[in-house]
Each structure stands twice: as C-alpha cells, then as structure tokens.
Amino acid sequence: MNRILICALICLLNTIFCYAQLTPTQKELFEKYNKQKSIQNAEIEKYSSPEIYEIDNDSTENFDREKNYDKEKLSDYERKTRQRYDFLADYQDSIELEEPELELFGHDIFDDVDLSNISNPYDLPSDGYILGPGDNIIVNVWGRTDLEYNLTIDREGRIFIPKVGELTASGCTLARLTQRLTKSLNEVYSDSKLSISYGKLRQITVYIFGEVNRPGGYTVSSLSNLLHALYTAGGITENGSLRSIKLIRNTKIAGHYDLYDLLLKGDNSQNLKLLSGDVVYIPVVGPLAAISGEVKRPAIYELSGDELLVEAIELAGGIKPEAYLESISLDRIGLNDSRILKDLNLADKNNLETNNIKLQDGDKITVYSIYDFHENRVFLSGHVKHPGSFGIDDTMRISNLITNGEQLKENTYLDRADLFRTKSDGSHSIISINLGNIINNIKNSDIMLQPLDSLVVYSFPDVSRAKYVSIGGEIKKPDKYKLYNQMRLSDLVFMAGNLTKQAYWVQCELARVNPGKEADIILIDLEDVLTNKNPQADILLKEDDHVFIRQIPNWRPIEIVTIEGEVLFPGKYAIKHKGERLSDLIARAGGIIPTAFANGALYYRKTIEKDISRRNIGQVINNTQETYYDSTGNVRTETQIKFNPSQLNRIIIDLPKILENHNSPLNIVLADSDYVFIPKYPSGVQVIGAVAANGTISYIKNQKTRYYIEQAGGYTPDGDKSELRLVKPNGMVFYGHKARNIKIQLGDAIVIPSKIKRKTDWGKILTTSATILGTMATTALVIDRLN
C-alpha cells in the first residue's frame, strides 16, 4: 500500500519511479504488450508502408492533448500516467509560448526610413570630391576688380569665364581648380583674389537590382554611396543578403559591402561612393543560423560560410553571465529530412577544437541558462507519442521512461532502440536496447538510466529496406514502384495507370530474381487477372520483380500520307495495309490530271532524318573530316562535307515508270507521314551559275546543254565547264561529259559553277626567297672563316 501511495505522489510531482516488484496492474499491461509483440512478429512480412495503407494512429488513441477520457474506467496506473502526460504537454506549450520568435538580424535598419534625409542637398562634399559635368560652382573675384560667376561644368568637362576663356574642370578637386583658375585670372586681372565654392551638385543615375523592395534605376546625388542606394530602393528584402552586396562598375565588380561590418563593428570603410551608371546588386541570402537563449542579441544570422560556433555566438553579442556553456544545444538538418541534436561543451578548454564546430545552413543554436539547466534529466525521441526531456531520480529505468510501453506508437520496432550515454569526460557511447524484453520483464534488460541519457526509438519503416518492383511495355506509366505488403500484379498495373489500348492481354512476362541462377520468366494471362479476377492468376509480387506488357502483334495506329498537286483528289489518306505502294495512293487520289508533270514528282519521308540520327551518321562524317596542325600546334578540322540530315528526307523517284508498271521495284512502299507532290508542267529549262544571264530558257525538243548555255549568254570567264551539273526534275544529277551530251528535257536545270582560283603573291615569294638565300650565304661565310 505504501508503494502505491509513493508512486502516486511521485507521478503528481512529474517524476517517474520504478520498483523491482511490479503491481498486478502493471503485469496486466505487460501481458497486453506481450500479446502486441507476438502480433507484430506475425505481421512483419505483412507490413504496409504508411504512405498509402496506414491509418493515422495519432488521433483519439493517443494521450496527447486528449482530456475527455472516462477516468472511472481507468486503473490507478493508467489514470496517473495520463495525468503526467497532460501536465508535461501543458508545460511544453507554456515554454513554446514564452520563447520569443527570432528575427533576421539587420533588416530592421531599413524600417520607417525618411527618404528626404538620406541625401541632404546641403551636405558639403569631402575634400577629395571630384568635379564632373553638371556640377555647379560659384567663383568670386575681388581686389581691383569685383566679379562673381555662377558656372556649370558642361558635358565636355569645361567652364567658360569671360576674358579668361575655357578651362577644364572635370576631374579636378575644388582645391586644384582654385589653383588653376587663380593662375589664369592673374594673367588678366592684377592684384585680384578669388574663392570658389560649391553650388548645386550634379545628379547621377544608378541601378539597384536583386533582392530589394523597389528594384530599378534611380537618379541620386553625386554624393551618394552604397548605403544611400539601398535606402533609396526601400531596403533589402528578407530573401536578400546583407553580407555580399556587390557594386558593379563597367561590367566588373568594383567592390563588396558587408553590412555586418557596419552593424557590428561600426566599420563603414566598404561603403563606396557611387558613380553614374553603377549597378548595386543584392544576391539571395546565404546560409542562415538561429542563435537563441542566453546570448545578448538572439536572432537569425547570415553566415559568411566559414563561421565556427564561437564566432557565431560573437555575432549574437556574446554570452550572458548566466549562460551554461557545458551543454550548448545544436539542432542540425540531417539526411532524408531528419534532424540531428548535438550537445556541445564550450567550457572544456581542452576539447574546445572538437566542440567548436563549423556551422551549416539551417543550424539552430540554443544557449541554456545555469538556472534552467538541470543535469538530472534524460531525453526521449523517435517513434514515441511524447518526445522530450524528463526528470530522473536514482531508481529510474528505461521502463519508466517509456511508461512500460504506453509511450510507444503503433509499428514500433521493439527489437532495438539506441541509448546514447554521456560520460563524465564529455564523450558519448551507444547502448543497444531491446524494448520487447523490457516490456516482457526479461531479466537484466531494463537497465538503470543516468543523467543526460538519450533514448531513440525506431519504427519499422526506419529500419526496413525499401523494396521495389518495376513494370514496362504497353502501360501508361512505366516505372519502378514501391513494393507493398500482399501486393499483386493487378495492384501494380493499377498504380501504373493501367494498360494502353495496344497492350497484348493474352500473355505478359514477369521476370523474377533467382539468386545465383538465371532469372525465372513467368508467363501470365492478363485477361484472367484483370477481367476474370482469378486470384490464382493474380500472382503475389516479390522484390525486384519486373513485369513486361507486350504489344499486340502487327498492331499499328492509323498511318497518314499526304498527296498534293496535280491529282484529282489531293489530301491526306490513311494507309490501308502494310504493302500499299505509291501507285495505289495515286489511284485512290483519282490519278494524275492532264496538267501534271510526272517527271517532277517529289517524294519526302520524314522518318529518314530520325533514322540517320539514330545511326549516328553525322558523327561519322565529322570524325572523317580532314584534320591538320595549325601554326600553334593545335589540331584543326577542315570542314569539307556540310551534312544536313533534313536534306536526306527526299527520295528520288521515277513516277512515269512507276505508273507504267505497278510491280516495278521503283514503286515505293508507303510509310507514315510520307508526303507526295506532283507539280504542274514547268515553263522551260533553268540555267544557273557562271553564265552571262541566269534564267529560264524556253524548252526546245532534242536540244543539248550547249544550246541553253548559249541562250543564256555563254560562259563567264570564271565558268568551270568541266564541273557542269545537270539536275533532272526528279532530283537525279548528271556530271561532266555526260551532262553536256545528254538531251535536255522539260524541267531540267543546268548548273555551271565558278572556277576555284589560287592567288599567288609573287612579291612575297621573291622576298622570302631572297631572305633564305642571304641567310645561307652568311652561314657559308661564317663556316669558311671558322675553318
């Protein structure tokens, strides 16, 4: 009875107490979880990923934030456990409400800025101010002559003074201009003195882009600097960097500006003056780290890329006197969207190098107070209902921390959890824990906890290897898919978007890994699986299975060919069968009409270009081009063959012969997307190239090439007769002697290229030869003298 009272008292004080001898109620709970363990072991192979199948168990079955349970139906142990969870949850919520929200450091300097005060028109330039076009100066002369001049420097950088003339002022300081003007005035006015002062200063145009609130071009005072520009553009956005502001001048980076130097050190040396045409660019913010707790300036800070933990704390103004340096918490983003918690000891000077680690983007640093930090605590994280830190006493064991299994979620992996233990010297060790043995009260499994112990609990997905199957062929979404428990072929087909219309239902192939042997090939009747719903045929899938859905034999979509020009019914026609030929298409189009010029028929096949690309012919041609070494010793390629695959799409045909004999081998078989064009009769014969007049000559029957060249005015002086080409209407080309002697037909084209001339620089040749001869003579003379 005393033990029950003590346990109730400790639960109310938010601590956990464990006894060597368990109460009957606890034994009942253990039996319950022993039964759960046996069920889980039987269901391991039936486990389904929570991505699709698992119901959200963190609802009314969990204790967190649920207080509407019937207390009368609970045992004392369960009621006290629930009260403890409710108290902890309320405590954690109160901590979260008290913790101030961190803000980005430095961005508030651009809040509520009066733009009229950014650049005061009455500000005096520094002694080093360089005058330029548009600046206004006032010149006063006194002595024998009293004069006053209000002068503005013109676009050429000059000023004009009566009786003195023009003087160059641009590029001078005020002191330098005073010296030059005094010298010039003394030549005109004796015994006179002068002074020069600034009038209205010039305006310049600068451009501000990147992560600013109002990017664009601005007209500002010539006294403006980088900080003025940032204020003018409304300040830097939260996505902008304060540490790598760039000044670009004449397309080159003229300087970088780190606002942290100004904000933290008062160093404004990088705040460069602007010139007209300058571009101020603010890139996206760099890596960020949040620093909170017992530091003087908690905030989110931008890292330059190489800060260590101590340097980051210095950014935050340093630590407060009550900071606890023996356990600084670092929350870091790990792999696979996980987070890593580290305790770092900056009080240990001997291991400072180990604990003073380099920071990364997304790090969260918390410096605890010596008043809030308690060493008598342990941590629980992972696949549990209430992760966090818990108080510890001298008798606390793991069973108390997990509340004899009540802390564990569904699908918890009971065979192993990891206990990370902090030793007295600050080092860490890992101890593997069998949670199932603890729940079943196996001897020596429930170890005693020590201060700062951290228990990590895993789920089955955490420790299980992901398994996949794949499907390809005539399926809408061929890909690799996750293998779920009891997953069958029909499930995979459904996940892959179902079969395409050309899929072969009679049979598909399933390839299965057979370790150490050839893969097993299983043939499956898809109709029996998908239509008849036969469970015997709907095979259970295994890891790495590959399903291939075949295509219906001889299946093909509707293939269209186009015929245009001089036929009775031009248009787009579907190919009736695989062996349909060109003559069949012309017959279906009503045949050619009297105005058709059959010899000039054009036939194009788009698939030729794709076929050429697949065969990599273009690369073969490039690899066989002539190569040579240039004067610098580099290998150069001489392009001799210009290859354009699209020009190969035309197929040369002899339509008159095709129409005479349907069985002729010239009668091409149609293919999808073929294009046929039958032109009208041409006007004559074209003569192109090195002739007096390019043009079309009226066709005269039985005349040869010479006749048409003479009609075109004959060869020009650079015409190359030996390279003459005759291009027939169907695309065939004849060359040289045969081209000159063949009888010309209507629609032919005669092409006469120009000769390739080689220009010889005899003067250069003679000069080079004389130099060589002179060198040889000198060499011979030296050898003779030496002998």
Image (cartoon, rainbow, N blue to C red):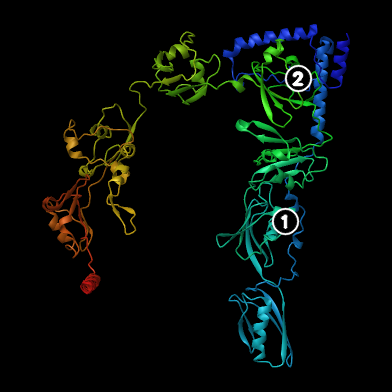
Q: List x then y, in percent, for residue 256.
A: 63, 57
Residue at (64%, 30%) from the top-left corner? 338
Q: In this view, does 309 lie to the left or right of 696?
A: right
Nearer-N-terminus badge (2/1)? 1
Label 2: state its secondary structure.
helix
Q: Where is 18 relative to 215, above or below?
A: above
What amino acid is at disc 1?
Answer: Leu
Q: Nearer the viewer, residue 600 or 740?
A: 740
Q: Mark 2 points at which residue?
A: 401
Q: Mark 1 points at which residue?
A: 262
**Tag 2–tag 1 contact (CB < 8 Å):** no
Residue at (86%, 11%) from the top-left corner? 3
Q: Is residue 611 left or right of residue 719?
A: right
Furthest-front residue in this view: 787
State which quadrant residue 22 falls in: top right
Q: Where is 497 relative to 302, above or below?
A: above
Label 1: state its secondary structure.
helix
Q: List x then y, in percent, for residue 252.
A: 56, 60
Whole-angstrom CA distance, mark 2 to mark 1, is 50 Å
Residue at (22%, 52%) from the top-left corner? 683
Q: Where is 679 relative to 474, above or below?
A: below
